[in-house]
Amino acid sequence: MFRVFSTASYAVQHLLPRVVKGMSSETPRNTWERLKCTKLVEKIRLLDGTEEKAPGSIRFVCISDTHNRTKDLAAKIPAGDVLIHAGDFTNVGEISDVIAFNDFLKELPHTHKVVIAGNHDLSFDLETYDSTYPRLGHGNLEQHRHAKQRLTNCIYLEESGVELFGIKIWGSPWTPWYYDWGFNVERGPQSLAKWNQIPIDTDVLITHGPPLGYGDLCEDGDR
């Protein structure tokens, strides 16, 4: 049985803002300079997929940004209990590409497949799709508005969660604003409001963007 979370916990709504008091999501580079000395990161050894799974363990396999390039990919993905796809499974959210991705998921042997959208999966962001689809040449607007319903071979998360094997997983597609793509949010209070929805007892957090300080450094030095 799955337990689905659709609202933030009291602890996140009321305690987390106090933890980040004095820090600003508008200036991530400055915030990271203040935080980095206090953050301990445990390096993990990445598996190549050929190792035997330890008895009693749960194996997560994580992929992202496949952008329609799923042909012959199924055979290369390691086996596991939970497959996570962290968004951008299409280029611009066309319904035919969503259907193809769903067919690809069906081929995979993992017990559970958990998927979030990314900024390229435009038809999944219903709040902005009316303004973004005209420049993409998508036909059949109404069909694209129901793209999420085409993902029948996975658990789709969007500011929501699921519990698998006793592990609480939360998925959020939001990233800082970038040239009017999907699931964009302005830095600062708007961004913080999204992150404050994450339950404080989350075990696995799936986002389309990287965490502060790890894999987020841009060429211009910003994060």
Image (tube, grey):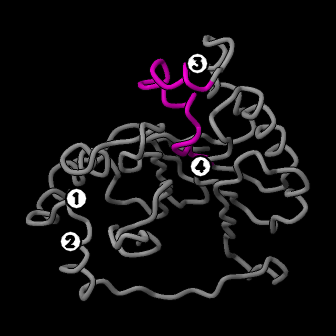
What residue did someone put label 4 on?
87
User: Which numbered dot is residue 91?
Assistant: none
Work out which quarter of the rendered image holds the N terminus and state it. top right
Work out which quarter of the rendered image holds the C terminus and state it. bottom left
- The residue drawn where x is 66% and y is 66% is 60
Q: State yes or no: discs 2 and 1 in contact (Cβ < 8 Å).
A: yes
For residue 146, side relative to residue 102 (left or right): left
Label 2, label 3: how many angstroms apart (C-alpha)? 38 Å
- The residue drawn where x is 41% and y is 59% is 202
- Please name the amino acid that badge 2 sits on: Thr
What residue did someone put label 2 on?
31
Residue 47 in which image quadrant: bottom right
Residue at disc 3, secondary structure: helix
Magenta stretch bounds: 115-136
What residue did someone put label 1 on?
25
- Please name the amino acid that badge 3 sits on: Arg
Q: Position of residue 44 (x, y in %)?
A: 57, 86
For residue 213, side relative to residue 4 (left or right): left
Badge 4 density bin: few <14, some 14–19, many ≥20, Cα 10 Å: many
- Please determine whether, in this image, residue 21 is positioned above or below residue 112: below
What residue did someone put label 3 on?
145
